[in-house]
Structure formats: C-alpha cells, structure tokens
Amino acid sequence: MRKIFVICWLTLLLSGICYIFWHQEWKYSLPTPVPQNYHTVNTGDHIDVSNKLKAEKSKPLFIHFFNPDCPCSRFNVPHFNSLVRKYGDKITFIVVVINKEKEYTEKEVQDRFDITVPVLSDQSIAASCGVYSTPQAALLDGDRILYYRGNYNRSRYCTDMKSNFAQMAVDSLLNNISNPAFSQYALKAYGCQLPNCTR
C-alpha cells in the first residue's frame, strides 16, 4: 500500500513539474498559431501609419509591439532599451502596447519598464503591420515601406548574438542593404498571441 502511495505521489509531483515547465517555458518556444482572419502584410508593402503615429517622415521607424503581461515581452525589455540607446539618434522608436485585459497608460509603462520612447495603445497598428503576437518588431524605412517584421532574437532572453535579428535588420537598413535574408526563426512569430496576448 505504501509503495502505491509513493508511486502516486511521485507521478503527481512529476506531472506538476511538467505542467509548470509547459506553462513557463516550452509553450513559448513553439510558433504562435496564425489567426484564421489574418491579413497578410509582406515586406516591401507600404504601411500607412501617418494618422496614428507622430514620427519624422524621412527617418526610419521602429515599432515595438509589447504586452506587459506577456513573459516573452518582459524578458525582451532590456534588449529593446539597448536598441533605443544605440540607434535612437538615427531611428524613431515607438512602443505599441497590446493588451485587451487591462488598460495601461503611457506613463505607467514607461515607469515600470524604464522605457524612454512614446507608448501607444492602438491594436490597429499591429494589424497594419501584420503583427499577431508579442513581442514583435516592425521596421519601416523613411518612406514607410515595411523592411522587417519579426522576432528580436531566437533566445527568449535575447542573449544569442548570432540571432540578434532586430538589430541585424536595423544595421542592414542603415547600411542600405536591400532584401536582407533571415531564417525562419526571425520571421515566424513566437510569443503571446493577439488579440488577448495569451497562450
């Protein structure tokens, strides 16, 4: 009887560990499912955001799609802030918060995550750029042509320098490289799914 109890207890414990691993790690390493009503937006398409964003027209625009409640988004913040510090004089950075569960003010997001750029809450910008998960980056050139839309890094913590996709895209744009090649890990969406940014 005692042996059966121990086996049941160990099975329950192992199941709990597997669930926690799934909930915190593994599910975020799987691609985000493409929504049924998804409208395809391709690199090279013109993105009309002039009536939604105040940005210098001749300057490239980097839009960071972010959800404060998404673990992947939170891990991404230090990397995003480092991009702002490095390229802020050459590129306009804007954060678009996507969260249908809670309203976040610009100041609340800026203070909580040490973000120094404008913060907006307009989900239509995500649809315009073809974004359906967070965190995602959309990089538009000075003519508002979509140059890159995708992930920041293959690593959840943005620590793999070999797959620093968003920074590679910025460098390519600033060096006038057309059609940079990226792997599926750069272009396939991972993270929290819109519109609710949940998994």
Image (cartoon, rainbow, N blue to C red):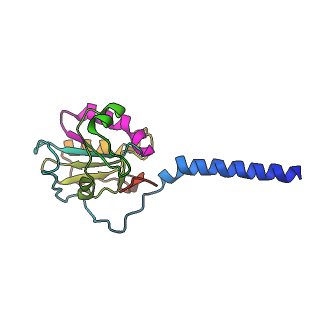
Q: Residue at horizontal 43%, vertical 38%?
A: 159
**Residue 46: x and y, percent?**
16, 58
**Residue 136: x and y, percent?**
33, 49
Q: Is residue 12 left or right of residue 60?
A: right
Q: Is residue 177 magenta?
A: no
Give the magenta-colored segment's residue range: 70-94
**Residue 148: x and y, percent?**
26, 52
Q: Residue at horizontal 28%, vertical 65%?
A: 39
Q: Is residue 122 left or right of residue 99?
A: left
Question: Seen from this angle, which residue lies furthest bottom?
Answer: 36
Quadrant of the image occupied by residue 69: top left
Query: Which secondary structure type mostly characterizes the magenta part of the structure?
Result: helix
Query: Depth check: 141 or 39 in front?
Result: 39
Q: Residue at horizontal 53%, vertical 51%?
A: 26
**Residue 43: x and y, percent?**
24, 58
Q: Is residue 26 left or right of residue 59?
A: right
Let me know if residue 24 appears in the view: yes
Q: Is residue 9 left or right of residue 81?
A: right
Let me know if residue 180 appears in the view: no
Quadrant of the image occupied by residue 44: bottom left
Q: Is residue 82 magenta?
A: yes
